[in-house]
Image: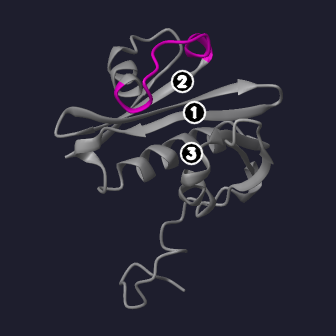
Amino acid sequence: MIQGKWFPQGSDLTEALQIREAVFGRSEDSIDSGAQSTLVYQDDVPAAAGRIWWQDGAFWLGDIGVLPDYRGQKLGDLTLRLLLFKAQDHFAREVRLICPAETEGFFTRLGFHRENVLEDGTLELMIPGDEIDLDTCKSCKKKDCPLRTE
């Protein structure tokens, strides 16, 4: 069973930090105290994590990662959608993130577009809040799907 769980500011982030350390090689930082984190569990085992915070007039997403043993199961997609849902729920005007260039496609398929290339080669991406669309059927290639209403 797959389950998503939210951790508000001040929560115990031990499991999220373990995923961050395993995926990104980083631990706790100054953003954690003001961020909300989400974990995705598969069969009660933490498998993916991400976080969202408010900074400089925008919501920012970061550290969206999936443990290697759980990749290819769309858990990263679910994590990103949970974060975007949280942004929508807070009436976000825009959502931003910084990512390695090789992961740009993961984010652009949900509507993010490139805003800037940073000095270290990473990309700053943005999506206006009114362009967030979490409808999974919209981009689905299955033309005979019974859930499709188009």
- Structural distance between the alpha carbons of marks 2 and 3: 13 Å
Query: Which residue is found at the position 59% from the left and 44% from the top?
Result: 100
The amino acid on which the numbered mark 1 sits, given as a three-letter code, is Gly
Tag 3: Cα neighbours inside 10 Å, few (<14), some, or many (≥20)? some
Tell me if residue 108 comes above or below residue 96 in the rendering: below
Magenta segment includes 91: no
Q: Considering depth in this image, is 104 or 112 the residue closer to the camera?
A: 104
Q: Mark 3 points at which residue?
A: 85
Tag 1: Cα neighbours inside 10 Å, few (<14), some, or many (≥20)? some
Q: Name the residue under label 2.
A: 36
The amino acid on which the numbered mark 2 sits, given as a three-letter code, is Gln
Q: Considering depth in this image, is 98 or 5 the residue closer to the camera?
A: 98
Which quadrant of the figure contains the C terminus?
bottom right
Give residue 126's position: percent from left, percent from top: 74, 48
Nearer the N terminus, badge 2 or badge 3?
2
Give residue 138's position: percent from left, percent from top: 55, 74
- Structural distance between the alpha carbons of marks 1 and 2: 11 Å
Magenta span = 22-34
Which mark is on residue 62? 1
